Amino acid sequence: MATDEIERWSPFKVWLYSLLNRHPKSNHAAVELASLSGRDRFLDVGCGLGAALEQAVACGAEVAGVDPSPSMVAWASRRVPEADVRVGSAEEIPFPDHHFTVVINVSSFHHWADKEAGLKEILRVLAPGGRLHIVEGALRKKNGHGLNSDSAQELAGRLLELGYAETKVDSMKPGWWHRYMVVTGIATSRT
């Protein structure tokens, strides 16, 4: 995968985005879904402005984030100084093997340059029994930025093929407006 295929936002575009997306309900709901405790090591892939990181820190978890945009990383690092936020992508996560107990990805899976490489890379950084939660907007049509029921089921099946031990597909509606599909994968327990 060529790193030039990854979208990187300019400081101005990040500032504009921050005006409307500083506290998205989807991030809040994703962290609630993760049921974090002080024993968890949490990673937000595509952490953006750091809303989920902020919430995860409040749960007492060890918190990290990656985003391909240096401007987003700078913003999230200022917002959540307790978090280890680095430039990276789903396909190239700059953290060690088997480190995280929970990885989330909220509304950016559809932007990944190489989805299969990203899913494998997340499996690499998940601890045995660790959980991945991919949260994407629920689509009514077949195509678009998000997942419909069929594509969510296909994603869950692909996770199993890649070596995740089990998967689950669900949906959530954190506010009155948008509904989200949630695909969860559990990392194989290595013995």
Image (cartoon, rainbow, N blue to C red):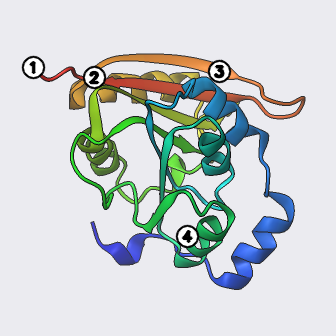
Q: Which residue is drawn at 28% across and 44% down?
A: 125
Q: Dot 2, how many residues are within 10 Å of its Cα: few (below 14), some (14-19), or many (20+)?
A: some
Find disc 2 in the rendering and name its residue: 160
What is the quadrant of residue 76 in the picture? bottom right
Above or below, comparing residue 15 to residue 89 in the picture: below
Whole-percent x and y of residue 38? 50, 32
Q: Give the residue pinned by disc 3.
A: 171
| Label 2, label 3: how far apart the Cα atoms are | 19 Å
Task: Report the amino acid beneath label 2.
Answer: Leu
Q: Which of 127 and 121 is in front in this view?
A: 127
- Residue at which label 1 appears: 191
Relative placement, left or right, of 130 versus 10 is: left
Between discs 2 and 3, the one toward the N terminus: 2
Which callout, 4 or 1, points at the residue further toward the start of the chain?
Answer: 4
Residue 86 is left or right of residue 57, and the answer is left
**Mark 4 crowdedness (10 Å alpha carbons): few <14, some 14-19, many ≥20:** many
Q: Is residue 159 left or right of residue 161?
A: right
